[in-house]
Image (cartoon, coloured by chain):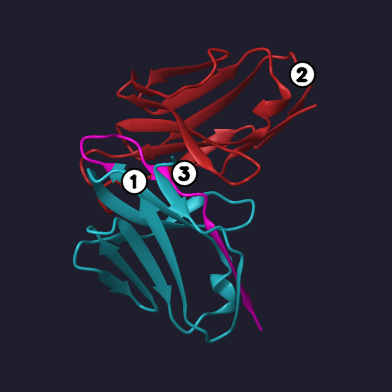
Amino acid sequence: RKEVEQDPGPFNVPEGATVAFNCTYSNSASQSFFWYRQDCRKEPKLLMSVYSSGNEDGRFTAQLNRASQYISLLIRDSKLSDSATYLCAVRQTGANNLFFGTGTRLTVIP
Amino acid sequence: DTAVSQTPKYLVTQMGNDKSIKCEQNLGHDTMYWYKQDSKKFLKIMFSYNNKELIINETVPNRFSPKSPDKAHLNLHINSLELGDSAVYFCASRSWTGQGPVGELFFGEGSRLTVL
């Protein structure tokens, strides 16, 4: 079983739509959670960390549900520039590396 | 200046050859990584070094040998290349002392390896 699972999509949404991605993790000892964005043929870049109480950054909202072991990313008012692959990442307590999901591909359509 | 830089960005080679990828970071980070991203976009940890010391060595064939001459550099040498080694190899670094969000990885631009 993979450490982190994501729906690969693709998600094709019109501009202005709200879209949500979920990501589940298998190890209950996981401690740190992140969403990364990866554009085509580019490296992953941190979009936002996910805090226990949930957090928002502009049109992006991240949430953590420890009981069900999943994290989510909500994008409101989608822009064409949001088109990318969104990777969730999880670090376990005391571990040094991040485990990544396979990514969810989003295409925002004009 | 690029924070994490890798060379070469593209590498096309024949099966059986030996090749190296180099990585350098100028962020002053203590920890560096090699990740492999396959054709299905799955990003998987291969190795991690902390202050030149190997701390993570996932299940990777021993044809792959990392080397860290100092904490700013981490190289990856691959012997006897196979078709299945074709992938994008990303170098990354992280600070223990919390530059940016705790635990943020900074990635290089990737080295796209194609084995023919």
Q: Residue B101 location in percent, x, y? A: 27, 54
The answer to which image quadrant residue A66 occupies is bottom left
Closer-to-camera residue (B71/A57)? A57
- Residue to which mark 3 is pinned: B107
Could you say whether the residue bearing mark 3 is in a helix, strand or loop?
strand
What chain does mark 3 sit on?
B
Q: Residue at x 70, y 20 (%)?
A: B82
Q: CA distance from mark 2 to mark 1?
A: 37 Å
Q: Are marks 2 and 3 in contact (CB under 8 Å)?
A: no
Q: Is residue A27 magenta?
A: no
As drawn, the residue found furthest toward the bottom would be A16
Q: What label does residue A26 carry, if any?
A: 1
Residue B105: x %, y % from top left: 38, 45
Q: Residue B15's mark? A: 2
What SS does tag 1 mark?
loop
Q: Which mark is residue A72?
A: none
Asked if labels 2 and 1 share a chain, the reply is: no
Where does the magenta region start and end? A92-110
Task: Give the letter of the red chain.
Answer: B
How far apart in space, not on screen, are marks 1 and 3 (Cα)?
25 Å
Q: Quadrant of residue A80?
A: bottom right
Chain A shown in which color?
Answer: cyan
